[in-house]
Image: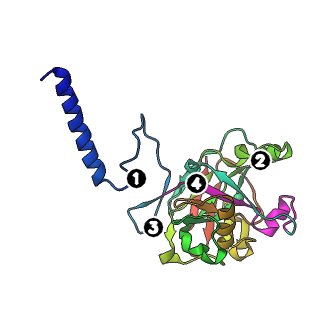
Amino acid sequence: MSNSRRQLLAGSATMATGALVGCALPAGAARSPQTPFDVAQASVPIVGSDQVFPVRRIYCIGRNYAAHAREMGSDPTREPPFFFQKPADAIQVVVPGTVANHPYPTLTKNYHYEVELVVALSKGGRDIRAEDALSHVYGYSLGLDMTRRDLQREMGDQKKPWEIGKSFDHSAPIGPIHPVAKVGHFADGAIWLKVNGQTKQSATLKHMIWSVSEQISRLSQAFELMPGDIIYAGTPENVGPVVRGDLVEIHIDGLPNLSVKIV
Ligand code: MN
């Protein structure tokens, strides 16, 4: 047998083995192309499980509380809430009972907190009806939609995209995800934020203009939702600035508090 014939046979054997291995893998995994380097999948721990929740997209709802819409200079009776996104790897996981160091970002002199309910989806879809929407929810957490307010405003004034103000590295601190089976759904209950022990934001979830069901339903008209999508449900009024050294504590009734230190 010639060398080239031998190599060809060896190659076919490898391919055959690969095909067999491929058959043993779940559908999808077998089709994954090889990559020249690894890219981390953003994920969030799931409470009471060894599994993690893989984050596909982070959607955020803007101006979902009337009083916050007014403080941002808009009229909530005339302008409905709206959507924007952060990159999935903007996630910063914060473990309850610890204080996570949150880096003060570059380029801003007016860095703001926004405490928010976070909704994690296990089912996707298009044009989801509000009455069916909650069956798409895997669980809930709480988080911060951190904002370079000066850059957000500047870009808004210039009618430019506001990613630089909202969608930067580490801009989405979040706690572990609590499955719906354990905590139920969130329509009411206190939501608050303290800086250095002083209450800054304090409201209830029932003041959301779009409920969680409406958020999912409306988002699914604009985007096909997928498992792994999470939604930051908007912040109540009294957003404000932090500086290095500040300790930020956030709370939603029914979830453990989270703390971050701005460093
Ligand atoms: Mn927000």
Q: Count the marks: how many? A: 4
Number of residues whose C-alpha sits closer than 10 Å to that of mark 3, classed few (under 14), some (14–19) or many (20 or more): some
Q: Nearer the viewer, mark 3 or mark 4?
A: 4
Residue that numbered label 3 is attached to: 47
Of the numbered discs 3 and 4, the one sitting upstream in the chain is 3
Point 29% across, 52% down: residue: 23
Residue that numbered label 4 is attached to: 57
Contact (Cβ within 8 Å) of mark 3 with mark 1: no
Number of residues whose C-alpha sits closer than 10 Å to that of mark 1, classed few (under 14), some (14–19) or many (20 or more): few
Measure the alpha-carbon separation of dots 3 and 2. Answer: 34 Å
Q: Give the range drawn in magenta.
A: 54-76
Measure the alpha-carbon separation of dots 3 and 4. Answer: 20 Å
Residue that numbered label 1 is attached to: 28
Q: Residue furthest left?
A: 1
The numbered mark at residue 136 is none
- SS assignment at label 2: helix
